[in-house]
Structure formats: structure tokens, C-alpha cells
Image: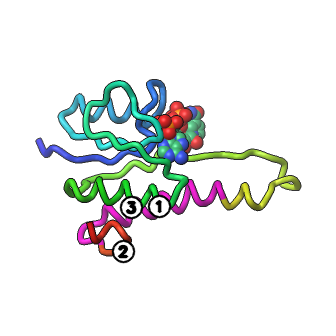
Amino acid sequence: MTRRRVLVTGASKGLGIGRALVEQWAGEGHTPVGIARGAPQSFPGEFHEADLADRAATDQVLGEVMGAGPVDAVVNNVGTVRPAPVGEVALSDLDAVLDTNVRTAVEIVQAALPGSSNGPWAAW
Ligand SMILES: NC(=O)c1ccc[n+]([C@@H]2O[C@H](COP(=O)([O-])OP(=O)(O)OC[C@H]3O[C@@H](n4cnc5c(N)ncnc54)[C@H](OP(=O)(O)O)[C@@H]3O)[C@@H](O)[C@H]2O)c1
């Protein structure tokens, strides 16, 4: 069996989707690499604490993850919502949601691409 190193964002919480995927893949012999703001008491793989809403923290953690070896697959599970009637949506909230949900997903996929040189982590 090919053992894969799988990066899962939002991987910490017991009942969360990311953590459930981590448990399944670890049980199948793969190596989960988890990221969340708070470290769980235990984790069946590599775990990194980082707030992915923070660009500098995202760059740093991707440097650490990619510096430890290539990633074979990515699950962009972290996401945020700030629900409001459309007439009341604050544009600052819209910016924050797009940044966390879209910028983070693109940045993580870029970092994981083979031969990636598109980002500060590439120098790590
Ligand atoms: N559950 C549902 O019914 C449902 C439905 C539709 C879509 N979704 C989407 O599916 C995803 C997972 O949902 P879930 O219910 O499994 O969520 P959850 O149980 O709340 O888990 C979210 C995970 O993301 C981490 N996280 C949150 N913000 C983060 C940040 N800024 N940086 C790094 N890690 C962060 C959390 O840990 P920390 O708090 O320690 O950072 C936790 O590990 C979310 O994107 C959600 O919007 C869920």
C-alpha cells in the first residue's frame, strides 16, 4: 500500500470533519499532518498549531510542514462564516471570510504542489 502524507486543516476537534478524516487515514496507515489553532491532547500524526486567518502564521506553518517533507494530498477543511442578511453584510466581514476560506485554500494547495516555488515557504 502507498502510504501518503495528508495535510488536513482544521484537524483538531473530536467531532469535527477534519479530525474524523485524520482518524480514518491514520487507521489506514497514512500519515496525517494536522493544523489548527489549538493542539489536541493527542494526535495520530504530525500536528502544527497555527491560526490560518493570519497570513504570517500561515506562511510559517506551511514552511514547517513542507520543510518536513512533501505532502501527497490536501484537505482544505478550515472555513468560517459570518452570516447576515445581504443588506447588512459588512464588507470587512466579507473580506475576512474570503481571506480565510479562499486565500488559505489556494495558498495551501500552492505550497503542496510538487516543485512549488510560489511563496515564502519555498525558501525553507
Ligand atoms: N458541520 C457541518 O454541518 C458543516 C456544514 C457545512 C460546511 N461545514 C464546513 O466544514 C468545515 C468543518 O466543519 P466542522 O463542523 O467539522 O468544524 P469544527 O468541528 O468547528 O472544527 C473546525 C476545525 O478547524 C479549526 N479551525 C477553525 N478556525 C481555524 C483557523 N482560523 N485556523 C486554524 N484552524 C482553525 C478548529 O480548531 P481550533 O479551534 O483549535 O483552531 C477545528 O479543528 C468548516 O469549514 C465548516 O464551515 C460544516
Residue 78 visible to the viewer: no
* Mark 1 element type: helix
- The residue to which callout 2 is attached is 118
Mark number displayed over residue 56 = 1
The main secondary structure of the magenta stretch is helix
Task: Please state the horizontal and vertical placement of residue 96, each as a whole percent of the image.
Answer: 65, 56
Quadrant position of residue 10: top left
Comparing 60 with 62, the one in front is 60
> Which quadrant does the N terminus fall into?
top left
Q: What residue is rendered at 25% in x and 54% in y?
A: 72
**Could you tell whether 12 is left or right of 55 in the image?**
left
Mark nearer the N terminus (3 vs 1): 1
- The residue to which callout 3 is attached is 109
Closest to the camera, between mark 3 and mark 1, is 1
Stretch in magenta: 96-116
* Mark 2 element type: loop
Q: Give the residue type at disc 2.
A: Asn
Q: Give the residue type at disc 3.
A: Val
Quadrant position of residue 45: top left
Task: Please state the horizontal and vertical placement of residue 24, each as a whole percent of the image.
Answer: 30, 31
